[in-house]
Amino acid sequence: MKKGYFGEFGGCFVPELLMPPLMELEQAMADILPSEAFQSELHGLLKHFAGRATPLTFCPALSRELGFELWLKREDLLHTGAHKINNTLGQALLAKYMGKSALIAETGAGQHGVATAAAAARLGLRCTVYMGAEDVERQSANVRRMKLLGAEVHPIESGSRTLKDAINAALRAWISEQHDTHYCFGTAAGPYPFPDLVREFQSVIGREARAQMLEHTGAFPDYVVAAVGGGSNAIGMFVPFVPDTGVKLIGVEAGGTGRPGCLHSAAINLGRPGVLHGEYTMLLQDEHGQIQPSSSISAGLDYPGVGPEHAFLHSTGRVKYGIAFDHEALAAFQKLCRSEGILPALESSHALAYVLEHRGEFEPNSRVLVNLSGRGDKDMDIIGRALGD
């Protein structure tokens, strides 16, 4: 497979001014990332700061109701509340080894921003976070957390005022600040080598899950399900299972309200190939190549594209990509809260919603593993408004 590509998807389509830091990052990945010193320090941070390994949780009540075993990979129990800390600790540590003194980041739901701010504080780096103004409003608690951790937060008023526009602003800032700054990219997308780098740090999820399922059940799961926006939590869960052909992999995109003509974030199911943020992938765009607005009740899934490896896995048929709607995610959120005492993020609720809504497609007595990528504290205001509570 050509470097930087997954089949036809991927690449590095950026202004010439961004090529030097991307080439520097690629060289650091080759020289620093595999070193014993780096890996040892990263393992220590993941274990003693982030809280790895995260447990598997069996859901007895829902399993009885569904007729198959439902297991959750509990990334919600990590420090800062989501899988994002796996990637930010890795990139922040790599930046420090590269001699950088500052991080910039984009964020949608705010979890990547919080995780970047926490990693920067831990490692003594300055931190600036770009966030769409709409996301600043709907994720105000995470904005306060970022600021408390020492980050400077820039609301972006242009475009749709969401994640897409935050990425645009962060890339522009990196051009002028690259000499001492690393762009801590938050998802498995963007120009090469970011999809490879983020996958490297997030694949700890799937590696742990494989070993834990064997320990708990003596077998691999029959199905692995994860929500897909840009796609970092899902690619981290899926990639270690890709060689296990007996394991069915299901990614779940955000379908918005589900009403005819609604805005949504289902780039794989309802999009077409094109270039955005330095990569060739599946996008929401019109016949003229203009990027269309995306929408989801979940800020972390509200993005008009998807990482190139997901586009490739869809093209090969190795991963099936479905859709869950806002109301289904809300229902799944409530179901998990009341049945199992676990409060999931709205992103993760989309993955659970697919399992609940498509229960007849799962074999009786099979083992279904859902990646619970984050906790729902950050979504309380959104959920309260949506439920009228």
Image (cartoon, rainbow, N blue to C red):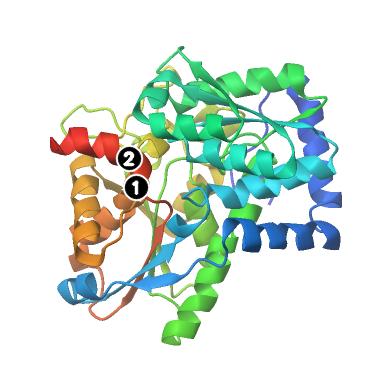
Residue at the far top: name it: 158
Q: 227 left or right of 388?
A: right
User: Which residue is tagged 1?
Assistant: 376
The amino acid sitting under disc 2 is: Asp
Q: Quadrant of residue 362?
A: bottom left
Whether residue 71 sits left or right of residue 210 in the image: it is left
Image side of residue 135 versus residue 94, left or right: left
The residue at the point 65 percent across, 54 percent down is: 200
Q: Residue at x 58, y 36 (%)?
A: 149
Q: Amino acid at mark 1?
A: Gly
* Image: 94 above or below 201: above
Judged left or right of residue 178, residue 47 is left
Q: Residue furthest bottom?
A: 218
- Within 10 Å of the Cα at label 2, are there few (<14), some (14-19), or many (20+) other Cα atoms? many
Position of the C terminus by quadrant:
top left
Q: Is residue 39 above or below residue 218?
A: above
Q: Secondary structure at mark 2?
A: helix
Between residues 321 and 215, which one lies in front from this camera angle? 215
Q: Which mark is residue 23?
A: none
* Residue 255 visible to the viewer: no
Q: Which residue position is annotated with label 2? A: 379
Residue 159 rendering spot, x and y as whole percentages: 43, 14
User: Can residue 299 be seen by looking at this rendering?
Assistant: yes
Residue in the image at 58% along x and 54% along y: 202
Depicted 350 relative to depicted 245: above or below: above
